Amino acid sequence: MENKNICSIENISKYLINEYNAVEVSINEFSIIDEASENTVKIYKIEDENTIQSLLSKNEKEEILITIEHLKKNHLMEDNSLYSKYMNKISTGKLIVITLESDDNINLSGFTMQGSGEKLYNELISLMGEKIEKVPNPLDETISDIKQFKPYGNYFK
C-alpha cells in the first residue's frame, strides 16, 4: 500500500477490503461479541477461509487444530447461542474481526483483532508505524519440555 498517508482509516479500509476480502460490520452486529470502544471508527470481518489460512503462521495452524479437537471432544461446538457461534468461528480459524480506532476520525490510532492471523496483525502494526518486536513466549520452553512426556495410566487411554 503506497499512499501518502498509509495510516488513514480510509486507506486501511480499502486495503482490508481489497487484499483480504474484508466486509464492514455494523457496531450493533459487533456488540454481540464485544463492546466497541469510544474511539472505534470501523469494524471489519474476514470470513474467507482461504484468506484466513494464508494469514496463519505454522504455530497458529497447530493451535487451531488443537482447539477444534478440544471443542469437539467436549461438545462445545454444539452451543447455538449467537455469542458462542461467533467465538467458535474465531477460535477455529474461520473468522477474524478487526476493529479500527482513531482519535481524530481520520488516522488510525489503534486496532484490536479477534482471531488468528499473525501476518495481518504484523501488517496492521507496521501501517501504524510501530516496529514489530518479536518477544519470545516464556511458556514455549515449558511446552516443549512437556511434549516429551507420554501420559500413562487409567485416565489417559
Image (cartoon, rainbow, N blue to C red):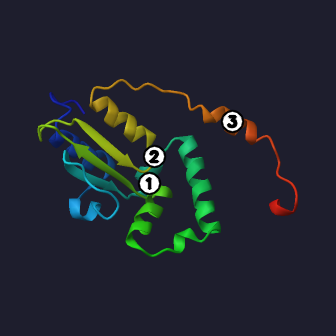
| Residue bearing mark 1 | 50
Give how far across and how far down residue 99 sits, in percent.
28, 48
The reply to whether the C-beta atoms of the residues labelled 2 and 1 are less than 8 Å apart is: yes
Query: In the image, what residue type sits under mark 2?
Result: Ser
Instruction: Name the residue at 24% across, 45% down.
Output: 100
Instruction: Residue 142: give its label.
Output: 3
Give neighbour class at mark 3: few <14, some 14-19, many 20+ (Cα, 10 Å): few
Give neighbour class at mark 2: few <14, some 14-19, many 20+ (Cα, 10 Å): few
Query: In the image, what residue type sits under mark 3?
Result: Thr
Alpha-carbon span between mark 1 and mark 3: 32 Å
Q: Is residue 7 above or below residue 19?
A: above
Give neighbour class at mark 1: few <14, some 14-19, many 20+ (Cα, 10 Å): few
Give how far across and how far down residue 32 sits, in percent.
31, 65
Element class at badge 3:
helix
| Of marks 3 and 2, the one in the foreground | 3
Task: Indicate which disc, 1 or 3, sits on the residue closer to the N terminus.
Answer: 1
> Is residue 87 shown to the viewer in this render?
yes
Give how far across and how far down residue 47 sits, in percent.
37, 59
Quarter residue 154 falls in: bottom right
